[in-house]
Amino acid sequence: MTDTTAVVAAGHDPAKPEEAVAAVVARVSRWGRWGPDDVLGSLNLLTPAKRVEGAACVRTGTAFSLSQPFDETGPQNGWKKRTNPVHTMLGTGHEALDGEFPHGIGGADDVIAMPLQCSTQWDGLGHIFDHGKAWNGRDAAAVVRVEGDRLTGIETAAAHLAGRGVLLDAGRVLGDDRGELPDSYPITADELDEVARAHGVEVRPGDIVCVRTGQYARTRREGWGGYAGGPAPGLSFTTLDWLHDRDIAAIATDTWGVEVRPNEFEVAFQPLHQVAIPHLGLFLGEMWDLDGLAADCAADGRHDFFLTAAPLRITGAVGSPVNPIAVK
């Protein structure tokens, strides 16, 4: 069972998640901040100046892919009909031998079938609603229909997700000697600040923040287990004020669902999502591989970098696969 200490300390009753959500929404909602027609939410904070700031972090040119593999051995177990990618070859090297094409040329083609949120991905603004309301107070049924999200579809974010990235390696600072937090560990706002101080890095408005818990590293040793939807370390519900006050553009973690699981209420499902996406307009990145980047940051003491993490321009999608690249 998850630790409810943080939500109790914040004045929330673990038996009353609906009241807790409403109280936080009253403090942090950004509806109308960028006008009634806004479709970008927190990505409005990723300005050209922020991209220049991010580019200035590049010193060695060392690059890290922050994506987990997209293959049939991934973490998905069928929950909510999410499966691992199925990759099929449409053409192989045999075609060259069969003489399908003239003058000796050959080629191969392939196809992939997968849920858009089966591995490293962004949650878009049409992914989560609060009491039937989508980002900026719109009616959820009017925003996301059978044909997809025709207003805040993930394609609206495709040109924006590049700028200054900051790694907060909570696993190394708060965790065990492997640099890993235990499942069900809620990371609080004070702890996020503690990790930033330990790294000597400042979280600034418009940053893309990456939080490493170490859970993904543990799956590499022990297998996926309940990684998809099961117990996990993650952000406490009480970090919503921190996410709001820091004015970050996006946040990503190495876990399946960003927030601590089980959630910090007696009966709840992803209450941080319920506020962060429809009310903060915040893009959430899930299932990122932060281990290689984290090792390099620990070695050179630099925890900021240029980060580009563009979603695919899939019209009307509420999420997208991504291969984030961090450049130091």
Image (cartoon, helix red, strand yellow):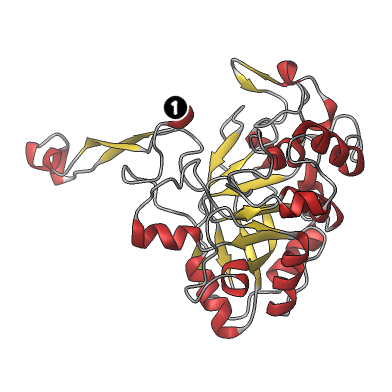
The residue drawn where x is 89% and y is 30% is 36
Vertical relation: 275 (above or below) 256: above
Vertical relation: 58 (above or below) 301: above
The residue drawn where x is 32% and y is 46% is 73
Residue 300 position in % (x across, y down): 58, 84
Q: Nearer the viewer, residue 241 or 97?
A: 241
The amino acid sitting under disc 1 is Lys
The residue drawn where x is 14% and y is 34% is 100
SS at badge 1: helix
Residue 328 position in % (x across, y down): 59, 74
Residue 163 position in % (x across, y down): 70, 60
Q: Quadrant of residue 88?
A: top left
Q: Quadrant of residue 264?
A: top right
> Crowding near pointer 1: few (<14 within 10 Å), some, many (20+)?
few
Decide if residue 275 is in sight here: yes
Decide if residue 30 is in sight here: no
Q: Nearer the viewer, residue 52 or 6?
A: 6
Q: Which residue is mark 1?
A: 81
93 horizontally vs 272: left or right: left
Vertical relation: 147 (above or below) 184: above
206 horizontally vs 181: left or right: right
The residue drawn where x is 44% and y is 54% is 68
